[in-house]
């Protein structure tokens, strides 16, 4: 019998290296993500954690593995403590990352900013991208 794999709730956490009390910060982030998923009835939680990686680069092993799961259709929900845990740097990169997640029918939850922040990031990224494209046509 072929059963469809149950989609997961991806819990993505990241902490840069050099943080004081790093273990406490890691545990706190993990616990808050898990508590949020449980409180909101988000099923099948799976952690993707990058410790000691800057959010200014997308070259993070667990981030890449999580995005692969998203684009493969294995993720129903993605929970982050803050959007900057997902990606930092320029607004265009952040908006593109958020848009890619949402374009794959994944519901994005940011504990700190709420759902509205994700939609604002996409709107801003779309506006910036449109301006770059328009500038290129001149």
Image: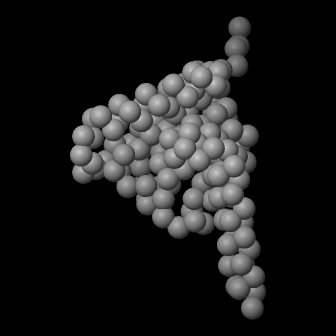
> Where does the image place residue 48, in percent across and percent down from the top left?
46, 35
> Where does the image place residue 66, in percent across and percent down from the top left?
53, 40
In the displayed structure, would residue 8 be above or below residue 69? above
Residue 52 visible in this rendered orientation of the protein: yes
Who is closer to the viewer here, 76 or 15?
15
In the displayed structure, would residue 136 be above or below residue 112? below
The image quadrant that residue 105 belongs to is top right
> Where does the image place residue 2, in percent across and percent down from the top left?
70, 13
In the displayed structure, would residue 1 be above or below residue 20? above
> In which quadrant will I find the C terminus?
bottom right
Residue 86 visible in this rendered orientation of the protein: no
Residue farthest bottom in this picture: 138
Left or right of 97, for residue 2 = right
In the displayed structure, would residue 126 be above or below residue 65? below
Residue drawn at (24%, 40%) of the image: 21
The image quadrant that residue 26 belongs to is top left
Residue drawn at (71%, 8%) of the image: 1
> Where does the image place residue 70, in percent across and percent down from the top left?
62, 40
Who is closer to the viewer here, 39 or 99?
39
Residue farthest top in this picture: 1
Q: Count the numbered circles shown.
A: 0
Residue drawn at (52%, 46%) of the image: 82
Residue drawn at (58%, 42%) of the image: 110
Q: How is the image coloured?
A: one colour
């Amino acid at each position: 019998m072929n059963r469809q794999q149950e989609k997961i709730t991806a819990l993505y956490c990241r902490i840069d290296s050099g943080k004081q009390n790093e273990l406490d910060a890691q545990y706190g982030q993990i616990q808050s993500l898990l508590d949020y998923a449980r409180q909101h009835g988000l099923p099948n939680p799976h952690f993707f954690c990058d410790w000691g990686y800057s959010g200014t680069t997308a070259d993070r092993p667990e981030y890449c593995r999580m995005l692969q799961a998203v684009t493969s259709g294995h993720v129903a929900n993605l929970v982050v403590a803050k959007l900057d845990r997902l990606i930092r740097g320029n607004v265009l990169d952040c908006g593109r990352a958020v848009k890619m997640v949402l374009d794959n029918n994944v519901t994005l939850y940011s504990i700190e900013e709420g759902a509205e922040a994700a939609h604002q990031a996409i709107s801003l990224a779309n506006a910036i991208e449109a301006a770059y494209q328009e500038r290129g046509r001149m």
